[in-house]
Image (cartoon, rainbow, N blue to C red):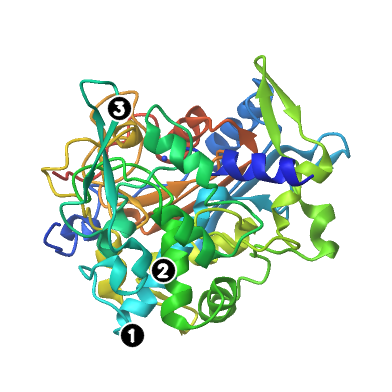
Amino acid sequence: MHGTRMALAMMLASPGFAMVFPPAHAQTAPAAALKVDTARIDAALKAMIADGRAAGTSALIWQDGREVYFGSAGMADREAKHPMLRDTIAQIYSMTKPVTGVALMQLWEAGKFRLDDPLAKYLPEYAAMRVYAGKDAAGQSRYVPAERPITVRDILRHTAGFAYGAGPTPAHDAYVAAEPLALTIPLAEASKRLAGVPLLYQPGTQWEYSIAVDVQAALVEKLSGQPFAAYVQTHIFEPLKMTETAWRQPDARLPRFAAMNVKKDGKLAQQAAAEAQMLNFRDHALTPGGFGLASTLDDYQRFARMLLNEGTLDGARILKPSTVRMMATDQLDPAIKERAWLPGKGHVGFGFDFAVRKGQPLTAQENRGATGEYFWDGMASTLFWVDPANRLTAVFFVQTIPYDGTLHRDFRAAVYGADYKGPPGD
């Protein structure tokens, strides 16, 4: 069982300085009001089941302060014959990351750190980082000192240089050997293990999806003096009345968990129940910032609505409006040309734990959406976004591994229409 847990942790860890100005385009009204076509969305969800890309799907959309769509199709657990319902609990994997970012930015608002402070000011293990610099003439790996410190801003925008699993370089090999996301260790130990791994590139020079959000969680613990999960529970989940979102779920909720489905040989195979529910972490030391939450549509929608309302929901203030706008602003300097697979998300940049849509879709194949939208997704193909231009939030649940971007393309086309372009941008 220990080996299985370690393997799962490694699987989960695999994928994906600019002046800050409020994104004025995020407040731009579209030329015509977007009307959500519920029948079109229903048909799209059912098609995902019919063509074998998903076992069960569900979605919840709010617009102009009210619910405009809820729908589901298929089964949460095919073996148990449990349908996908509104209160089904799904593993949201990297949709955990925006929650962690909000927690850290609360501490920024409290004056606990500055964005361009060296990370080592608070986590001293990062004081003397090395960077992998290729092979020498004899074929030996070369390492050079970091040219500048990793900053807090770097870990918020994935420009620190960290790895996130196996890869082609010795630095990736060192990451795998260090097991920084072993479920048996606490966040502080995870951070110390990671600090001993060489960086993939000089800080601030590239965008590379990474373990940085788990470092954010370790920083929340250090700055707040609370265990990370306890901080999030007290400062985010309780004020937002997110009563069923957690890293550790009670046994009474397990019958409502959606089973995980893994595509093998072109067909979805349902994981055994015990494997599908291992992420409850009830007996694990690690509470990661980058994955591990399970949630319901309604719970996560409350988080999304808080963001759309610029930090407030039902009288609870989570962040200041200016902070939410900063998180939803592209933070990548134009000089950062290497951006891994981020361009595959569309005409986007990256803010603090969100991808940020910078302009209209550039091709017919690109996902539909509105300029100023910000979003993120999860390894099991879950998705959420916040669309200020249309005053809309959407949460989409499915439990399909590997990540299937065609599900997002089809869901977005159903929400916006296949030809939607929205307001102009960059």
Q: What mark, if any, has residue 140 been given in the picture?
A: 3
**Image coords of residue 361 (percent x, y):** 26, 34
Residues marked 2 and 1 touching at CB (< 8 Å): no
Which element type, helix, strand or loop, lies under badge 1?
A: loop
Could you tell me which quadrant the C terminus lies in?
top left
Q: Which residue is mark 2?
A: 102
In whole angstroms, how far apart are the C-alphas of marks 2 and 1?
Answer: 13 Å
Q: Is residue 18 left or right of residue 262?
A: left
* Mark 2 or 1, nearer chain start: 2
Instruction: Kindly indicate the quadrant of the structure image that contains residue 240.
Output: bottom right
Q: Does 148 appear above or below 258?
A: below
**Image coords of residue 391 (percent x, y):** 36, 59
Going by the numbered disc 2, the residue's amino acid type is: Val
Going by the numbered disc 1, the residue's amino acid type is: Ala
Q: What mark, if any, has residue 392 been given in the picture?
A: none
Residue ID at (59%, 77%): 230
Count neighbours of disc 1 (C-alpha within 10 A) and say few if under 14, some if 14 to 19, many if 20 or more. few
In whole angstroms, how far apart are the C-alphas of marks 3 and 1?
Answer: 47 Å
In whole angstroms, how far apart are the C-alphas of marks 3 and 2?
Answer: 42 Å
Give the camera-side residue of 9 and 262: 9
Outermost residue on the front side: it is: 138
In front: label 3 or label 2: 3
Residue ID at (61%, 28%): 48
In front: label 3 or label 1: 3
Which element type, helix, strand or loop, lies under badge 2?
A: helix
**Image coords of residue 149 (percent x, y):** 21, 60
* Mark 3 or 1, nearer chain start: 1
